[in-house]
């Protein structure tokens, strides 16, 4: 799907208090961008920001960083934050392919929500749950590794379960139909609400790997 350009997007991004513009300089020290040093969780592919905004509001004892590749998308997230003061939330406009160059052993949890499924076999390595990306994430985690993944794409979910377990992750939570399971603490993304309204089951897994 082609993304529409948003007039003035670059200017809005450059002037927002939520955007970390010079993020390279904080590698290994990202708690410095927040008023309080506390665990950092990141969402890769934050989209229009509904999920990470609600997470930050619900958990003020955690610092959240949303990562989004496209100006036209991240500016929509900023519009949701215009009248908000959420000190434990920041956003970065960057490509996740460079993720291990940005963070260095300082992240406690990664959220992957409704990632691009890249369905063609030749594009497997582009999936955010592929071994290639799991290796990149190794550089990010501070201690134990925890990843939470949600999608409505069954093929991607099946692929991801195998990818996680083959890489040594253990499953701590699994749902093949999140809403049928009536999970009370779920925070939905924009895509999640759309697909659930269409009657699609929402798949979710949380995986972990303990530091030996």
Image (cartoon, grey):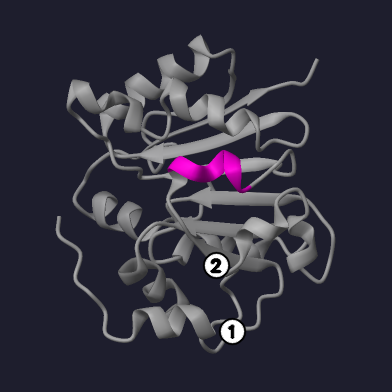
Residue closer to the observer: 97 or 75: 97
Seen at 42% across and 40% down, the residue is 150
Q: How many marks?
A: 2
135 up-or-down from 59: above or below: above
Mark toward the start of the polypeptide (2 vs 1): 2
How far across and how far down the image is residue 6, in percent?
A: 26, 79
Residue 92 in view, yes or no: yes
Q: Are marks 2 and 1 in contact (CB under 8 Å)?
A: yes
How far across and how far down the image is residue 32, in percent?
A: 79, 64
Q: Quadrant of residue 84?
A: bottom right
Relative horizontal placement of residue 193, taking residue 87 as reference (left or right): left
Residue 62 in view, yes or no: no
Which secondary structure type mostly characterizes the magenta part of the structure? helix
Circle number at residue 53: 2
Badge 1 element: loop
Query: Which stretch appears magenta?
Result: 97-102
Residue 135 in magenta? Answer: no
197 up-or-down from 146: above or below: below
Quadrant that contains the C terminus = top right
């Amino acid at each position: 799907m082609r993304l529409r350009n948003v007039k003035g997007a670059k200017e809005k991004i450059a002037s927002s208090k939520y955007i970390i513009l010079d993020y390279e300089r904080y590698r290994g020290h990202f708690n410095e961008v927040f008023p309080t040093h506390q665990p950092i969780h990141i969402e890769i592919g934050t989209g229009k920001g509904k999920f990470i905004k609600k997470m930050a509001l619900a958990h003020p004892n955690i610092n959240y960083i949303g990562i989004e590749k496209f100006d036209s998308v991240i500016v929509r997230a900023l519009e949701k934050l215009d009248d908000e003061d959420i000190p434990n939330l920041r956003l970065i406009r960057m490509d996740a392919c460079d993720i291990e160059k940005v963070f260095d052993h300082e992240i406690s949890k990664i959220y992957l929500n409704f990632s691009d499924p890249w369905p063609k076999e030749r594009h497997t390595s582009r999936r955010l749950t592929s071994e290639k990306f799991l290796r990149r994430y190794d550089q990010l985690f501070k201690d134990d590794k925890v990843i939470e993944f949600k999608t409505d794409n069954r093929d991607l979910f099946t692929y991801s379960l195998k990818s996680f377990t083959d890489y040594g992750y253990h499953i701590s939570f699994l749902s093949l139909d999140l809403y049928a399971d009536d999970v009370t603490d779920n925070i939905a993304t924009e895509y999640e609400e759309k697909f659930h309204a269409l009657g699609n089951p929402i798949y979710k897994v949380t995986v972990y790997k303990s530091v030996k």
